[in-house]
Amino acid sequence: MKLRKSIRKYTSKKIDREILNELLEIACRASTTGNMQLYSIILTEEEAMKEKLAPAHFNQPMIKQAPLSLTFCADFRRFSKWCTDRNAEPGYNNFLSFLNATIDALLVAQTFCVAAEERGLGICYLGTVLYNARPIIDALELPPLVFPITTITVGYPAEDPQPVDRLPLEAIVHQERYKDYTSESINALYAHKESLAENLQFIQENKKETLAQVFTDVRYKKGDNERISKDLLVELKKQGFL
Amino acid sequence: MKLRKSIRKYTSKKIDREILNELLEIACRASTTGNMQLYSIILTEEEAMKEKLAPAHFNQPMIKQAPLSLTFCADFRRFSKWCTDRNAEPGYNNFLSFLNATIDALLVAQTFCVAAEERGLGICYLGTVLYNARPIIDALELPPLVFPITTITVGYPAEDPQPVDRLPLEAIVHQERYKDYTSESINALYAHKESLAENLQFIQENKKETLAQVFTDVRYKKGDNERISKDLLVELKKQGFL
């Protein structure tokens, strides 16, 4: 687990249904709010569906190349239907319920990933799900009270990349209270990251002055974030969670 | 991993700092949006802080009884500070950024949990964090662009409970497209859960007609969910994410 890395290139080897089911069983042992299991998992294996989903993931090659993708959805629909059918009035069309279901979906997703990696599979998270929620909702035919949170691609690794850098633990861990950052502490905590050859190259390639500018001006731009935030709130409302 | 269960009673044995640091290192290898590491982890070990946090967790005994709790926070503050200090304009005070950071925080949390359990520790998630975000934000002194997502209690198990039931995989997994539920499929998928002695007892104890009513009328009530949803949106705004 200490050497893990995301895998973006896969061999053509399919994943046995038995292995897949075992991983899914393990994933569903993850903690879940009040044992309500507020998630659904959509498997993508058909070529036609991969073609349909690819643009929503900005045509990242993994989605078509991986033998399997899993989209983990926050799902209060199944539970609510059960309530209605049992003479109980569900009250889960709201933001708290969305976040509870989001937590559930992500604990299952990450448990799946750790278990898959322990069995020699490689995974990659596609954060693009939140950037293009509507086309994904439409393609996967997600009804109200179901919302896609993340997709992972899975397969046997056809690459062996170096693990990427991480900040030192002191950057992440706070004892008892949040210890706010100063310019001095930021300098110290980011020094290693900023010294790495691949990050220096990244600045050059993008013709920027600093690594941070590659993020703010190229990869995760304010204008995009604001537009997508608006869209997301609209889609949450359409799916019945706001 | 297939037999895991949440642990709510712990021995008084402390967790070695070395073991804890190793678990934290492993947790931080989890996938993270654009390698931005949009999370912070607050450790709670002092008695005074446990006392302060306990009411926000509805005085669940684990928070005081466990030697250690970890609160996983969505954190765009550190990254934004780094940007500002590097002549880059951060644009992360919005809802998309909150969700991206929430995903990051939960992948780290769950990786920590799996690794901890593999080393013989027991954990329990406290979903109460979202129910009482404000007192937790205040106690942990979380600044803008930091939001508590979940807390886990950790320690060596002093109990060995039976794993609780889960729905069959067919309830959770959809092939290619979401297959909506019918009354018939709900009956079949929930039959095992509804037949369990502990769930029948749960109905009796709560003087309800159905298990679903225990959830809607006692445990996760519409009125509470709506009130807390409003509060959450207010707190998200106060912390700069809306």
Image: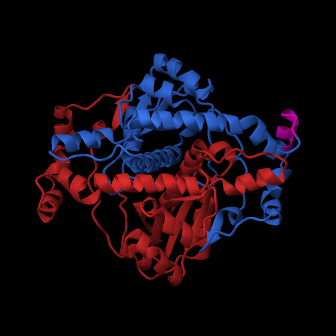
Chain colours: A red, B blue
Quadrant of the rendered structure where residue B147 is?
top left
**Picture coordinates of residue B201 (x, y %)?**
86, 39
Task: Relative to B62, say whether B121 is above or below.
Answer: below
Residue B62 placement, left or right of A156: right
Task: Relative to A143, say whether A185 is above or below.
Answer: above
Task: Relative to A139, say whether A96 is above or below.
Answer: above
Q: Residue at x 44, y 64 (%)?
A: A132
Residue B39 placement, left or right of B191: left
**Most common SS among magenta residues:** helix
Residue A216 placement, left or right of A121: left
B220 or A184, which is in the foreground?
A: B220
| Range shown magenta | B200-208
A113 or A200, which is in the foreground?
A: A200
Residue B148 at least partly seen: yes
Quadrant of the rendered structure where residue A22 is?
bottom right
**Picture coordinates of residue A184 (x, y %)?**
16, 32
